[in-house]
Amino acid sequence: MGIFSLTTLSTMAEKAVKPYWQDVQVVEVNKEYPRTSFMTYNNRADALSGKFERSKYYRLLNGTWKFYFVDSYKKLPENITDPNTNTDSWDDIQVPGNWEVQGHGIAIYTNHGYEFKPRNPQPPTLPEANPVGVYRRDIDIPADWDGRDIYLHLAGAKSGVYVYINGQEVGYSEDSKNPAEFLINNYVKPGKNILTVKIFRWSTGSYLECQDFWRMSGIERDVYLYSTPRQFISDYKVTSSLDKKEYKEGIFGLDITVEGSAAGVSTLAYSLEDTAGKAILQNEIPVKNRGLSNFITFDEQSLPDVKRWSAEHPNLYTLILALKDDAGHITHLTGCKVGFRTSEIKDGRFCINGVPVLVKGANRHEHSQLGRTVSKELMEEDIRLMKQHNLNTVRNSHYPTHPYWYQLCDRYGLYVIDEANIESHGMGYGPASLAKDSTWLPAHMD
């Protein structure tokens, strides 16, 4: 009994001092639960635009940051995340953009092997020569965000990501191709704050990210702040399908999660509008404040003779969601585009809206001169080129892509084969994919 207790205590002590990036049991710390990508707005026109930058509750942090790099984590100064550390000697770096294409470290291309252990991988061990990059910049919290919840959003960073504000550790994240969000109310103060992001090139999560492409590191996608009211729409799911008989009637369903609490009783309302701004479906439900999450399901509604969405005719409607207080004032406003369509296998043939479709597609990687950072302009150039060559399908190989890419696929008309950010070789878990690498290549879609 005594030996067991000593062993248990020893194991616990070892686990307590193991850093997150080396701990297979830790993939996130203090990170928000994943949700649909959307922004909060304060007026209808901005919400209809769908552009985050139109929101007064959004602050993009892209641009020039200060950057400190070491080729091994053991060379990292102990006070590197201290807000009093002087950064005059640090380099400048562009965010987003991989650090290897900006003069720090080496980009490595490999297909099946791990770049840090090309043969005979021994998970969860990682090399001692594990590079670390430390990003830093000042952030200002707008005065009119007082009384609201404030979030930091990292849309994509690789691989083991620590976040600090004013020297305090906020949280940790792995999974480079999905967002990491942190509630930062308890870490910020009025006026100037110092945001530091410390990234280990490799973490235990790297064993799940063995995609065949250029292996690079750092902040790859947008970084921004946003705020919400204390009671807010935290997530929602839209169902927009067609009847399976004639494929002419739209079927609309909506599930919404409202979180937080506020005084009084609020109302949750939605409006589905056509391209002329006419409301064709709408409903509202009272939301009682109990200080807990409220999951709300609206009854399905039908829409006769709906304009269907397809690659040839990408018809879209606009959904507006509004949370109102007991006086009828809108406290939270957001929205998205909605298309009505079905996809199914009928008699061995792939069908969209009941009609057999010949899939003509391409594999697509996120790749540019900035590494795996792709601008909105380049995304739009890619999708126009694909449409000009009569492609109707894209495979996101081998990970979820930037949220803007999905919006473009909706708008221009591309069927999407999406993939999770899991690919491992010789590991005994996770799906493995064998696509060839390129920005985009013609490919046969099975």
Image (cartoon, rainbow, N blue to C red):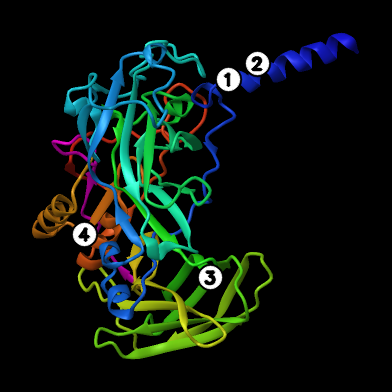
Q: Nearer the viewer, mark 2 or mark 3?
A: 2
Q: Is residue 261 left or right of residue 169?
A: right
Which mark identifies residue 14?
A: 2
Measure how far apart labels 2 and 3 are at the Cα level: 42 Å
User: Residue pushed farthest right?
Assistant: 1
Measure how far apart labels 2 and 1 are at the Cα level: 6 Å
171 in relation to 188, above or below: above
User: Considering depth in this image, is 194 or 262 the residue closer to the camera?
Assistant: 194
Label 1 or label 3, whichever comes before in sequence order: 1
Provide residue 364's location: percent of width, then percent of height: 23, 44
Q: What SS does tag 3 mark?
A: strand
Q: Which residues are magenta?
A: 355-372
Instruction: Kindly identify the residue that appears in the image at 85 percent across and 8 percent down.
Output: 3
143 in relation to 312, above or below: above
Count residues near mark 4 (Cα–Cα under 10 Å), then give few for <14, some for 14-19, many for 20+: many
User: Considering depth in this image, is 404 or 222 the residue closer to the camera?
Assistant: 222
Measure how far apart labels 1 and 3 are at the Cα level: 39 Å
For the image shown, how many numbered marks are present on the structure?
4
Q: Is residue 216 left or right of residue 342?
A: left
Measure how far apart labels 1 and 4 are at the Cα level: 48 Å
Q: Are marks 2 and 1 in contact (CB under 8 Å)?
A: yes
Q: Specify the amino acid type for callout 4.
A: Asn
Label 2 or label 3, whichever comes before in sequence order: 2
Instruction: Kindly identify the residue that appears in the image at 20 percent across and 45 percent down.
Output: 374
Q: Nearer the viewer, mark 1 or mark 4?
A: 1
Which mark identifies residue 392?
A: 4
Q: What SS does tag 4 mark?
A: loop
Q: Specify the amino acid type for callout 3.
A: Ile
Q: Is residue 169 left or right of residue 105?
A: right
